[in-house]
Amino acid sequence: MGKFGLARQIIEQGVKTIVLQSGDDFGFSRRMLSDIILNIKSAKPEVAITLSLGERPFDDYRAFRDAGADRYFLKHETANSRLYERLHPGQTFKKRIEILEYLKKLGYQIDSGNIVGLPGQILEDLAEDILFMKELDVDTAGIEPFIPQKDTP
């Protein structure tokens, strides 16, 4: 099928958006992902490419945009910085916001969102989430429930 055969095959079936998703997995380098984006865009420039690659170095976001990526999906999860940092040890809400603002500045369409039902979350937190997405002027808001699994701390 070739290196980009699957992408070409689904484009031929009429798919208008391709989502490349890995979360915070750095198994694919900036160069590898840029090559994938470039190859998809060279086959069909009108196909939208959405990335969901988590927090990466700022240079990666620019390289992916330069390669032709259109959208970036990065949930803010909660606008309550204390709650965010409790859920993400070693990460900060401030950095997440800086990333979202940078993506917007680069011209990405922004897909963000929050999680409802997080331990310690209150109604005011949900209101802040909605206001935050309005202020950021997100293109898509994904609001999802928190569903703990048996090993969720």
Image (cartoon, rainbow, N blue to C red):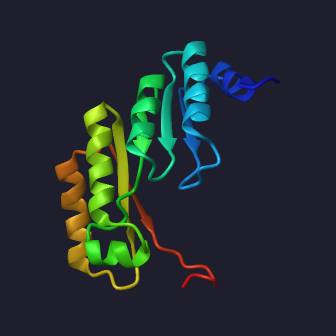
Measured as percent of width and height from the top left, residue 86 is found at: 38, 79
Q: Residue at x 59, y 50 (%)?
A: 26
Q: Residue furthest right?
A: 1
Quadrant location, the C terminus: bottom right
In the image, residue 118 above or below residue 15: below
Quick check: can you spot residue 7?
yes
In the image, residue 21 above or below residue 122: above
Give the number of callouts: 0
Left or right position of 69 against 83: right
Q: Residue at x 60, y 26 (%)?
A: 35
Left or right position of 85 against 68: left
Quick check: can you spot residue 15?
no
Left or right position of 86 against 50: left
Measured as percent of width and height from the top left, residue 62 is found at: 39, 33
Q: Residue at x 44, y 53 (%)?
A: 55
Measured as percent of width and height from the top left, residue 93 is found at: 30, 65
Q: Nearer the viewer, residue 117 or 25?
A: 25
In the image, residue 144 above or below residue 123: above
**Quadrant in the rendering for residue 120:** bottom left
Left or right position of 53 against 27: left
Q: Nearer the viewer, residue 140 or 20?
A: 20
Quadrant location, the N terminus: top right
Q: Residue at x 36, y 52 (%)?
A: 112
Q: Nearer the viewer, residue 63 or 123?
A: 63
